[in-house]
Each structure stands twice: as structure tokens, then as C-alpha cells.
Image: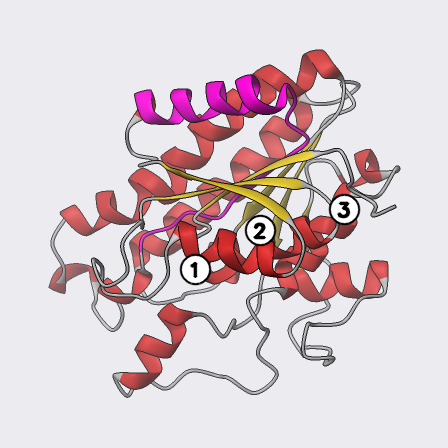
Amino acid sequence: MKPLQGQTALVTGASRGIGKGAALELAAAGAHVFVTARSVQEGAGPLPGTIGQTVAEIEAEGGSALAVACDLSDDAQVEALFERVDAESGRLDVLVNSAFVDPGIVAGKKIWESPVGWYDELNDVGTRGVYVASRLAAMRMVPAERGLIANVSSLGAEYYYQHVAYGMGKAAVDKLTRDIGREFRKTGVSIVSIWPYMVRTEAVQALLDKGIDLPMDGAETQRFVGRGVAALAADAERVEKNGKIFTSRQLADLYGFRDSDGELPTGSTEPRR
């Protein structure tokens, strides 16, 4: 029996990157995964990957998943997504908030060199979308007295990375995690933020292709964070982690897993203050 057999997970931003990796790992652990993002047609956007391709990879590995297109900036679409989870599964055990507009659009630009609209492009989905999805998940998890919300955040919440608007959005996600964690006390539901190190995603590869120098030594595969989420979801004592922020490497050290390539990435292991 796989540890998440019979459970249902919903992963946003699952057409590529960390979201795709999380969907693959949750499915590998036995969960039925709702794979959602806007990307449904290969070549329609600047980066490769679609929700259909993610589902195909999950099924090829023997997992169970369903692709549902959803624009997280449209509240009506998000509500319809959760209602579909209700109708088809009758439960929600794990939500992974990973959707984010490619931060490569702002790479190398200072605040005075970029239009105000870039703030909205980054944070309508990457920050507000987390709030909306977390609210809808909590409405289902709290009455059931179970569940995990995992927010993919970033060291950019504390350290400068790429653009001011990026850091502001990620800092807000971590604040949301702490505050919802406070409201989740004694409910049986947990919420955490996870900071990856450098991840070998399609977006990172696109930046490397542009000649942007990134610290790739010790980088993670896109499945490393997903292994941490799956381990948290299977942890009967995860309420002790509620409201906290972990690096992906901290989770690996805590639960004893390695990356999908067999390596142990060298990202920060320092505990958060």
C-alpha cells in the first residue's frame, strides 16, 4: 500500500517546473492528482509543458491523475475547479500552490526600468492565487479535520532575487502561511511554505539559454520539492510543522529522502528564524 493511497491532491502550476514535479511525486505515493494550469497546448507559450503531458507522465508511471485547465487569476474558474474535485473525489487531502508566472520576464531589470504591470503579472497568480486557493481548500479541509496545504515559496522572500516584485510576492506567501497556520491550530489541518534552492526547471533553463549566470552547482531536480510534500502528507505528526517554513533540503534531512537523480542537493540546511 502506497502511503497516500485513497487520498486526493490538487496541484496548481502543474504543467511544468516544481508543480509538475510535485504532481508526479504525489501520484507516485498513491494519491489521485488533479493537475491544473493554464497550459493545454504545446507551443502556445514561451515555455514547454502542458497539463496533459504531466498526466501522461503520471499514468506512464502507474499513477492516477486528471488534467483540468484553470486560470488562477479568474476566481470563478478556481471555484469551479474545487467544485469538480468535490464532485469527482468527494475529498481533498493535499493542495500544492505552485502556480507562478515565469519570473524570467523581470530578470535583470531594476524597479525603475520595468513597468508597474509586471507586479500584477507576477503576483495576481503567484500571491493572490495562493490566497484564493488556500481559502477554498480550508473550507473543505477544516470540516474534515485533515489536510495539508504546501506553498512553494522562495529564498527570494528574504534575499534579493531577480526583481523587487518577486520578493514582495514570496514574502507575502510566507506571511500567509504563518497566519493561516495560526488559524489552523487545533483543526487537524496543516500549512507550510517550502523554499527550494536552484531548481532545474524549464524556466531556469530558459534563463541559462539567455546567458544569465545562475548558481547551478548542487541544483535540485523539479521533483525534489514534491518528495518533500509527499513526505509531509504521509507524516501523521505533520501538525507539528503547521505554519512553518522549510527549505527543501531541510525536509530531505528530516524525512531521509534524496532527489530523483539519487543526489542530495546542497541548498541551505539552516533553520528559519
Is 267 placed above or below 54 here?
A: below
Residue 162 coordinates in the image, percent (x, y): 33, 67
Is 102 placed above or below 27 here?
A: below
Label 3 sits on residue:
232
Q: Residue at x 59, y 74 (%)?
A: 220
The answer, for residue 83, to whether it is visible in the render is: yes
Q: Residue at x 73, y 15 (%)?
A: 144
Is 187 placed above or below 92 here?
A: above
Is residue 148 rendered magenta in the image?
no
- Magenta residue span: 76-101
Label 3: state its secondary structure.
helix
Q: Residue at x 45, y 70 (%)?
A: 201
Q: CA distance from mark 1 to mark 2?
A: 10 Å
Q: For residue 16, which numbered disc appears in the image?
A: 1
Q: Amino acid at mark 2?
A: Ala
| Precedes in sequence: disc 3 or disc 2 | 2
Residue 119 coordinates in the image, percent (x, y): 24, 47
Q: Amino acid at mark 3?
A: Leu
Q: CA distance from mark 3 to mark 2?
A: 14 Å
Q: For residue 196, which numbered disc appears in the image?
A: none
Whether residue 115 sits left or right of residue 161 in the image: it is: left
Whether residue 72 sits left or right of residue 10 in the image: it is: left
Q: Are marks 1 and 2 in contact (CB under 8 Å)?
A: no
Residue 26 versus residue 218: which sits nearer the camera?
Answer: 26
Label 2: state its secondary structure.
helix
Residue 31 coordinates in the image, percent (x, y): 69, 41
Label 2 sits on residue:
23
Mark 1, Cα crowd under 10 Å, few <14 / some 14-19 / many 20+, is many
Whether residue 152 sits left or right of residue 208 in the image: it is: right
Residue 258 coordinates in the image, percent (x, y): 76, 71
Q: Residue at x 83, y 48 (%)?
A: 2
